[in-house]
Amino acid sequence: MAYEFDLVAADGTLRFADDAFNRAAFLLPEFQPATQVTLIGTPPSRIRVRAQGSPTEVAPGLLERIEALAGTSLRRATAE
């Protein structure tokens, strides 16, 4: 079963530097059951994650790494 969720910037703005989103897009499928990771919006305001299996939270350590790459705190939201 597939499901989607978004990681949304706490302040509304993602601030990925250079290659940082590519690293985040690599980390999520490696440590989460993600099959697709995309940026949503212009400027980007969400990270959309498509995953397999039953809905689960992003592991705290992984979330911290993604937040560091995004340059802001993130919260999980339902995909729109």
Image: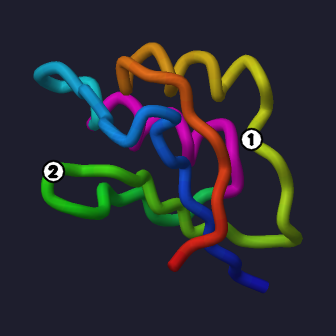
Magenta span main SS: helix
Outermost residue to the front? 11
Q: Amino acid at mark 2?
A: Pro
For disc 1, the marked residue is 58
Q: Amino acid at mark 1?
A: Val
The tag earlier along the polypeptide, 2 or 1, is 2
Residue 31 falls inside the magenta stretch:
yes
11 horizontally vs 65: left or right: left
Residue 50 falls inside the magenta stretch:
no
Characterize the local packing of mark 2: few (<14), some (14-19) or many (20 or more) Cα atoms within 10 angstroms: few
23 horizontally vs 18: left or right: right
Q: Residue at x 72, y 71 (%)?
A: 52
27 horizontally vs 25: left or right: right
For disc 2, the marked residue is 43
Residue 54 spot, x, y in % from top left: 88, 70
Question: Which circle, 2 or 1, is nearer the viewer?
Answer: 2
Please, is residue 68 above or below residue 40 in the view?
Answer: above
Residue 14 spot, x, y in % from top left: 31, 35
